[in-house]
Image (cartoon, helix red, strand yellow):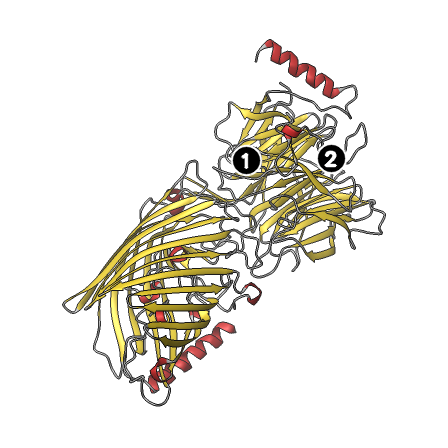
Amino acid sequence: MSWRRTTLVLVAFAAACGGDKGTGPLVIDPPFDLTSLGQGAVNDRFTAELWVNGNTAYTTTWGTRTVNNVQARGDAVKIWDVSSSQPILVDSLIVTGATTLGDIQTTPDGKYLVVATESAGSIVIYDLSDPRKPTLVTRFTNADIANGVHTSEVQTVNGRTYAFLCIDPRGGESARLVIVDITDPVSPSMVFSQVMGSPFVHDVFVRDGIMMTALWNDGIAIFDIGGGGRGGTPAIPVRLGGVNTVGGKAHNIFWYRDPVSGSKRYALVGEEGPGAIPTSSIGDVHVVDVSDLANPREVAFYSVPGAGVHNFSADEDRGILYAAYYNAGVRALNIRGDLGECAANQKAPDGRCDLRQMNRELAKGPVDAPVVYVWGVHYTGGRLYASDMLNGLWRLSTVP
Amino acid sequence: MQHRASVVLFSLIFAATVASAQDEHAGHDMSHDSTKAGPAVTAGASGILLGTVASPGINNRTLAEGYLTQPMVMAMLMTPREKFVANLTLNFEGSTLDRGELNAGVYGEGYIDRRHPHTLVHELVGTGNFNLHSLRMSLTAGKGFVPFGTDDPMSRPFVKYPVNHHLAQVLERALVIAAIGSGPLTLEASAFNGDEPEGPYDLPDWDRFADSWSARVTVRARMLEVQGSAARIESPEHATGGGLDHRKVSLSARYASNGRYALAEWARTREGEGNSTAFTFNSALVEGSMAVGVFKVGARAERTERPEEERALNAFRTPRPHSDLGIIGITRWTVLTTSVGTSLPSYRGFRIDPFVEVSTQKPVATASPAVFIPGDFYGKSRLWSFSIGARMGLGMKHARMGRYGAAQ
């Protein structure tokens, strides 16, 4: 990197980290590289979901990987020491009867770990008194979730902790959203269950008593579950609005809150098109203006030629969205400021702003890595991690 | 309970068919005089007792299994001069093949490397035939074979299905077919429901009737038949809709005369949304059979691309429908098959045709890196399948499957 570019990048990041962060966009052109600071290799199974809790990280596994005629299913949680840049595998646990672990997350207080299972649907809750040695608390299943839990979002609403489960369609039964109260992890109880999505309800994002659901070809829907002023609760969500994102296949959502301005204007929606793991993927990031929750509208998009987006994580303080981009690795986008206003030459023919043309792409990586297929990202405590189906767990730099 | 009831039903119908066995004849080549006064009813039953050894079947293990495969009862009602023809085929594989039949490379309807059982009501169609000057016309409605591609493998010389079954045939749909023919040329067009069956006792989703279409043109000259066909099938693998659509084309040439049979076919399926294509699967196949003394020998060569999907706890099953639209790669299967069979003397119309069939398969991933690496998964890069069995039948049998009315 030339000294001029280095200077430009450092000045841009300095601007992003201080001053009036709620206004002008951060521009870095061209994007810098997300370099690898360390890698924890996983070669026996395919790596999938990722959650980092302090100095411990958890990665799930997916499908079946066969190495030297030994078949290993996606039934393992890998437990990592991430106190240094180099992730170190310290233990693993096996979830019996699972072919894929659909999701993993700790409760907001960090005391429990919630793991979703497919193709036999359940959630498994572990006690994290010792984060490196999870102990089983309970495994919850019932007829509504038995078809498989594809994703699980754990959030607190009005003092109670819930798991929001997206259930697979199977054998003629439609996909459904199930909400389970896990405030008492020993005795989870289902409080809501409803068929949703076309053909899937794929993921949920919950913040401040508002639930956003990714409904595939039905776009996204927004519900009051306690913070919308319409009397909704997790047991009785009240629909506020929805929008069909361009191209459908709404897969996941992140609702950005600017900590400086307090603005919660934009939700970012991942579109997952038909890809062939681990060589191809397709699908854009869609930016939806949700300033009016009853009338959300798509205003912008971001596309990577030859690749598609998967899961998100954000550095909200700096206004950066990190997006797992499968065969294209990880992309960092500047999501601060006004994403729906742009010059004419930065618009697509349908009028949406193109974040790439707006120079909102900040960084990409990992560089100097073998072929990757990045499933998920997690930014926490100033550190960025990426789960790679083929190679395991990466720690990536967040500055040039 | 459902299985037991089906077995009992099959046994009763089979026994009834034996009791009232009629002259053997070849499917739609009616042996009776169709110009006589009243309607005629013909019936038949068939099945294959089969033993198969797959080496390796999976994970470097040799598997040996036995089945009653393709158990069917057929009936046909025909009015004078064939003004109206009704076909019924009941298939009892839901009772006898619940785990699927070992058939390396074959996939579809939630099974992989095992052939899935077909639905109980395999075919129930009525066809009205009309003539206008030199034109032959027909209108067919019911559940049955879509006018697309080639004959169903069940009516062809080999017991093991080709890998391309879901690329080269479309069946068990609620459909309406219009056909018109003149001289050697026949045109068919159909509308049908796109959703595949979700189990052997599933019925077509009527909400989706006519969301898909196909068209086929056939030219016949002497014993040679050439067809080209196209189909657009909406979301076949997601019954509720929203899955990838299939755009299919097929070209084939078929020869049949005096105990000699040959088929060459090419088929392509593109999966995608709208006009975009996400995945393309190609297939080429040649097969033939002929009489050599008292034996009938056959050979088939096939190269077909197969989508790979995440497998369930049972490694021969895939979650259905998929949880996403993705696949885990494409495998190209090269398959060589040969068979030798003969016919024993029939007893009161009861036919027994013993046979042996040997097949070898070589699957290769089309891209690297690959999630599904065939050599690792199966334990060897080349697979073998050995089958021995006997086709049994009584009464009518389908000489061909997949054409109705003016297209026959």
Q: Which of the 4 image quarters holds residue B405?
A: bottom left
- Closer-to-camera residue (B212/B264): B212
**Mark number, residue B407:** none
Q: What residue occupies the far top of the structure in this picture?
A: A3
Residue B91 visible here:
no
Asked if residue B295 is positioned above or below residue B109 in the image, the reply reads: below
Q: Would residue A139 appear left or right of B331 to someone viewing this image? A: right
Residue A123 visible here:
yes
Question: Subunit of mark 2?
Answer: A
Whether labels 1 and 2 share one chain: yes
Asked if residue A222 is positioned above or below residue B41 in the image, the reply reads: above
Q: Which residue is mark 2?
A: A256
Question: Subunit of mark 1?
Answer: A
Q: Which residue is mark 1?
A: A326
The residue carrying pointer 2 sits among few (fewer than 14), some (14 to 19) or many (20 or more) residues within 10 Å by Cα, namely many
Q: Amino acid at mark 1?
A: Tyr
- Closer-to-camera residue (A188/A103): A103
Q: Position of residue B335 (x, y in %)?
A: 30, 51
Q: Residue at x 43, y 61 (%)?
A: B116
Q: Amino acid at mark 2?
A: Tyr
**Dot 1: element:** loop
Q: Position of residue A69 (x, y in %)?
A: 40, 42
Q: Would residue A195 appear left or right of B4 to someone viewing this image? A: right
Q: Would residue A176 appear left or right of B379 to someone viewing this image? A: right
Q: Position of residue B144 (x, y in %)?
A: 43, 69
